[in-house]
Image (cartoon, rainbow, N blue to C red):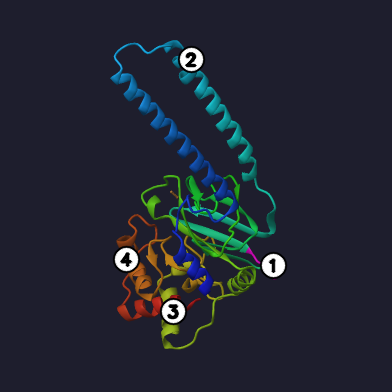
Amino acid sequence: MTLEVKAAQEAGPLQSVLHPAGQDAAVIGQFAWVLFIAAAVIFVAVMALLVLSLRQHARPPRAGLWIAGAGIAFPVVVLTALLGWSTWRSVELRPQGSNHALAISATARMWWWEVRYRDPASGTEFATANEIHVPVGQAVYLGLNAADVIHSLWVPALAGKRDMIPGRVTGLTLRADKPGIYRGQCAEYCGIQHARMALHVVAHAPAEFEAWLASQARPAAQLTGTLAERGRAAFLDQRCQTCHTIRGVTEGTPDHASAGLGPDLTHVGGRMQIGAGTLRNHRGTLAEWIADPQASKRGVFMPAAAGIDDASLQSLAAWLEALK
Ligand code: CUA
């Protein structure tokens, strides 16, 4: 993570419609302000008229004109103007100039995000989780799907919401105009841990994005040393490969299913958080999570590591942390 991205993260609120950092979000933010200000002005005017009418006991002069003017003509004119304006502005929200060369798809699962990339340079396809990395200044098209129930992707600083529906591919165009980390969240109730289904969009300068893509496309680092070897053995002993893929490690191992029930962990150490925004990612939280995922995220489908001794648990966490 560069200093530039870190500075951008510290500069602004993580998740806000009112601080847009992308084209679509700017249009949506403008809608929010115009509707709020118009509604506030009208509310204050109506309250003022109400106070006046309560203090005046006689029937006001030209009452019929007031009813026709303020009760019928004014709302028709104002609402028609707002409808026309918002329809005209909405045209800008349609996908345009999408970068289809860069294929990114996101699949929502209870309760995390699988994100798949195809590196155009090498043609390698890879999966990551809970982070969508994009190049700054380019419209990126995301293909969206869901594996179980309906979820919804919402990164308020960058774009509007888009539902993710099992068996149906929808799409969303994102464009981040400044480097930074933008928090997003599942915006459709999807079960007990709906609230802990967050993700981050990380917007990099183009060259930095290319470097990220190339490093992610590579298989996991072949780490040596007692800690790494012990960690790797603990991973296989615990049959973590039944649900998790680590490219370069899990291929051909017993019970390995590439169905991806759990996040791909090839470069898990490089992610900011674990449990879809539940815990900061470091070896302490990794050990905590592996030993008892229910303690941090009740209802999560990952089982606790069974009968693991503390040394193996610490080695496993240290090895995963080192898989950058
Ligand atoms: Cu996924 Cu709410």
Percent of width and height locating residue 40 = 42, 36
Q: Which residue is mark 4?
A: 292
The segment highlighted magenta reads 118-122
Residue at x 38% of width, y 80% of height:
315
Q: Which residue is mark 1?
A: 123
Ligand 1 neighbours mark 4 (CB distance < 8 Å): no
Distance of label 4 from label 3 (alpha carbons): 18 Å
Percent of width and height locating residue 324 = 51, 76
State the predominant SS element of the stretch in magenta: loop
Can you tell which mark lies on residue 68? 2
Can you tell which mark lies on residue 319? 3
Distance of label 4 from label 2 (alpha carbons): 66 Å
Q: Earlier in the sequence, mark 4 or mark 3?
A: 4
Can you tell which mark lies on residue 253? none
- What is the crowding at mark 3: few (fewer than 14 residues within 10 Å), some, or many (at least 20)? many
Give the secondary structure at mark 1.
loop
Q: Earlier in the sequence, mark 4 or mark 2?
A: 2
Nearer to me, 60 or 182: 60
